[in-house]
Image: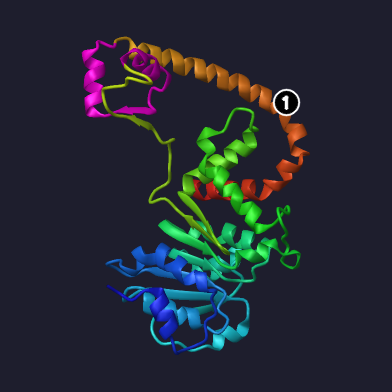
Amino acid sequence: MRPSLSELFLAHAGRVSDKWEQYLAIYDRELARFRDAAGPVRLLEIGVQNGGSLEVWSKYLPPGSSVVGMDIDPRCGALAFTGDITVLIGDAADPAALDRLLGDRAFDIIIDDGSHVSRDIIATFEACFPRLAPGGLFLIEDLHASYWASHGGGFRAEGAAVEWLKGLVDALHADHLEPSVDGATRGALAALNREVARVAFYDSVAVIEKPPEPKTTPYRRILSGTVADVVGGAAVLPAALAAQAGSLVLAAATAGAVSAAGVVGTQDAARAAAEAARDQAQAEAKAARARIAAMEASTSWRVTGPLRRFATMIRGKGET
């Protein structure tokens, strides 16, 4: 087995690298699958400083992996490295600069260790997340700065990066929002729901994982077993099947029990339920349009504005 990041970091004797102690265990937990990958891994780190972490990443990842550092400080461009380490000078929050410097390159791991200013964290995520490969991880360091006014943040302050990232948790649950949530916000969260598989928070670190492929439909419920002495049972199966047609999966034994019980008419009931749901959705959409003007002036609308812009960008990328 290849060495852990903790082992490599503590034994490192090259360029200086500065990390909080908890980061080593976090990275070992989150990146072990990349360390042990059979093939090369592509890593982009935003924020180079002295370049020590780039050297550590080069040792940590499998042979043939590429490590790219990006910084706005032109002095970083003069740093010399051995191996497949590249330093680019530019603003990772600027999509035009990214296109110029990276072309169409994608990465399996993206680490934001840049300015730690909230507006920069959000802008960098919006610009770089589309370059994250399916199944990849986007990690944000030093998120504690999001609680500091000096870095554009504050405790539960509007515009703080950590508050923006909490919105990604809402995106994970976009399939379960009630109709009272306005249509624009629902659409923005649904777009993010396709591209975000997991959000994890640690002390000063956030981890966002992209799914192996975009999620195109809501997850389904799976029903297994044949005995329900307390809740449910064969008597409620027809209604459940009709109400959740297309979103309920029966395991083999359960499906056999349903068939043996002679459940009939399920498809007709499912179609009727679908038509009723469609009519309800149309009515809700009409009512939502009447509420939009008031919602646009609300505080919640302003707070979720960056998420909506990012979702629009994600949708646009998927359509090109």
Q: Is residue 255 magenta?
A: yes
Q: Residue at the location (41% across, 15% down)? A: 271
Report whether residue 105 is seen. Answer: no
Tell me the residue that label 1 is attached to.
290
Tell me if 304 is positioned left or right of 231 in this view: right
Q: Residue at the location (41% across, 36% down)? A: 219
**Residue range (magenta):** 234-263
Tell me if 146 is positioned left or right of 246 in this view: right
View extreme (front): residue: 230
Tell me if 39 is positioned left or right of 315 in this view: left
In which quadrant of the rendered view does residue 113 lie? bottom right
Q: For this rendering, which residue is in front, 261 or 281?
A: 261
Near mark 1 (Cα within 10 A), the count class, few <14, some 14-19 or many ≥20, is: few
Residue 311 pos. (x, y %) = 58, 47
Could you say whether the residue bearing mark 1 is in a helix, strand or loop?
A: helix
Q: Residue at the location (45% across, 60% down)? A: 137
Q: Is residue 61 above or below residue 168?
A: below
Q: Main secondary structure of the magenta part?
A: helix
Q: Is residue 243 above or below residue 318?
A: above
Q: For this rendering, which residue is in front, 44 or 266?
A: 266
In which quadrant of the rendered view does residue 221 lie? top left
The amino acid beneath tag 1 is Ala
Report whether residue 30 is seen. Answer: yes
Q: Residue at the location (39% across, 12% down)? A: 269
